[in-house]
Image: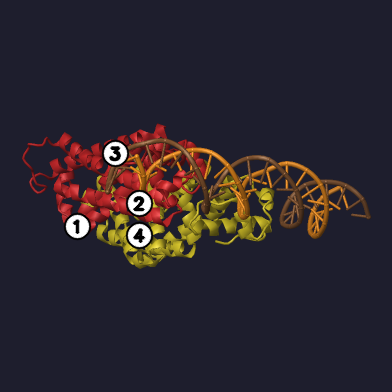
Chain colours: A yellow, B red, C orange, D brown
Amino acid sequence: MSYPKSVLAEGKRLLMAAALDLTANTRSLDGFSLRELARNAGLNPNTFYRHFKGFDELGLAIIEDMMSQIRQPLRDLRREAAESVVPPGSPPISWQENPRLNFVRSWQVSNATVELFFKFVEANPKAFILGVRELHGSSPVLRKALRKLMKDFAHDMAEDIETLGLLPKLDPASLLSVSEVISRELFQLSMDYIEEPERRDEICQQAGTSIVNLTMGSAMLGGHVKLLADALR
Amino acid sequence: MSYPKSVLAEGKRLLMAAALDLTANTRSLDGFSLRELARNAGLNPNTFYRHFKGFDELGLAIIEDMMSQIRQPLRDLRREAAESVVPPGSPPISWQENPRLNFVRSWQVSNATVELFFKFVEANPKAFILGVRELHGSSPVLRKALRKLMKDFAHDMAEDIETLGLLPKLDPASLLSVSEVISRELFQLSMDYIEEPERRDEICQQAGTSIVNLTMGSAMLGGHVKLLADALR
DNA sequence: CTTCGTTGTATACAATCGTATACCTTAAGA
DNA sequence: TCTTAAGGTATACGATTGTATACAACGAAG
């Protein structure tokens, strides 16, 4: 994760980057000292106070930055995945018309999204480590901020599922709830993905089937048994 | 969470309890000092070294203790829930014979289990806070230990689902995978449950439907569409 | 009764900590 | 041009840290 030089002061950038490094290398945000952080950033300890009131503020700045860099790319991932399965120009076919086609398409989009998601994790491991760690970490402030991030992420997902027609019609609450579970699962698995490179394929695949399980289970209980029975005939 | 005086030295017990307290009150295990811990336990700083080589060892001791106290009760919860729905003596009815009955039964057991699980969380909040926090925390040793704990927990769950007949026949790998997702979700939600008392009912209910979504989705894709279509007719 | 391992304490010390105060540089606005 | 605010540094100090060394109480084993 890099920080745009234009908007942030040099020192602030360096401190945030150093914090990411320290966090990734087996520490939590409250596990290292202000001085250690400054040392890692190559700065005077007092410089910290020029930019942050305390560690919470540092964490918030990082999270905010993370969010701004992650949110849109993840949405793009989903669109990209959807378009890789159904080219943009093609006419929409409803679930009622052809359940099986839509089911297969949905599965493929899910798998593609998962794959791209984990590639994204692989490209930004430190951000994810810090995020997942502090999601249940020691600072209430950061926990709240990260929960909001997860919530927004789930909201985006629900919206995309709807507009991309990835599921038969569900009531909004159920859809959001399913999206939240998927988000949690994905973020949680991202840690395993980072830490156990030899299991990456397996993790990827299991995440995919978990999503299918969840979405189809939800669709079924949402009144679409018949549809799915047709799809799987 | 309490420690049996008989087996553990007084000081060791006190230190473990103090660590739980400090962790629950917005700190992670590497977020406080050895001296602070000793102070909270009412002991001399050096007493720590009599029992632990470092913080990892302390954490492992706590986790081990946690596991020994949590594992069996959670299994009992499931049995208890199952028996509250189907009294112990009653003759088993297969999914093929009566899909609808089994479906309803499965749903009820799931809900009852979830309810009891969260009651258990409510009774041992500190243990869960420490566990979930260190699951993605800073110490690789503790992370590994807690992942094993989660794995064992999922394994138990899969076994119980099978022997209690809570799902139509699934291949073991899928069953275990579903159990793992459920475990992760439950533990993750336990934090929300602790921190947001006003949302407890909602969390409980959502956990229940997530489980049903997952299990039924999995059953459906495992080849039981027809069965579930009958159940939901 | 003596010995010895276990559990806990007391003291001590160098290293590191957070932070207060003061100073320097640079770029922007008046 | 002079002023001012922001970003960064230097020095300093009392508090706290991890840990080494030495010592006390005590129950069990010999």
Q: Is A42 on the left or on the right of B198, as rendered?
A: right
Q: Is B175 on the left or on the right of A48, as rendered?
A: left
Q: Are marks 2 and 4 on the same chain?
A: no
Residue A131: percent from left, percent from top: 48, 52
Instruction: Tell me, for residue B146, which label it has, or none.
Output: 2
Q: Amino acid at mark 4?
A: Ser
- In front here: B131 or A92? B131
Residue B1: percent from left, percent from top: 35, 37
**Residues under numbered marks 2 and 3 in contact, where contact means CB atoms less than 8 Å apart:** no
Alpha carbon separation for disc pair 1 and 2: 23 Å
Q: Name which of mark 1 and mark 3 comes first in the sequence.
A: 3
Q: Amino acid at mark 2?
A: Leu
In the picture, which quadrant includes the C terminus of chain A? Answer: bottom left
Does residue A141 lie above or below A166 as drawn? above
Quick one: label 1, few (<14), some, or many (20+) residues within 10 Å?
few
Alpha carbon separation for disc pair 2 and 4: 29 Å
Alpha carbon separation for disc pair 1 and 3: 24 Å
Q: Are marks 4 and 1 on the same chain?
A: no
Alpha carbon separation for disc pair 4 and 1: 23 Å
| Numbered-mark total | 4
Q: Is B227 on the left or on the right of B25, as rendered?
A: left
**Residues under numbered marks 1 and 2 in contact, where contact means CB atoms less than 8 Å apart:** no
| Residue at which label 4 appears | A110
Subunit ID for the residue under disc 3:
B
Tag 4, which secondary structure? helix
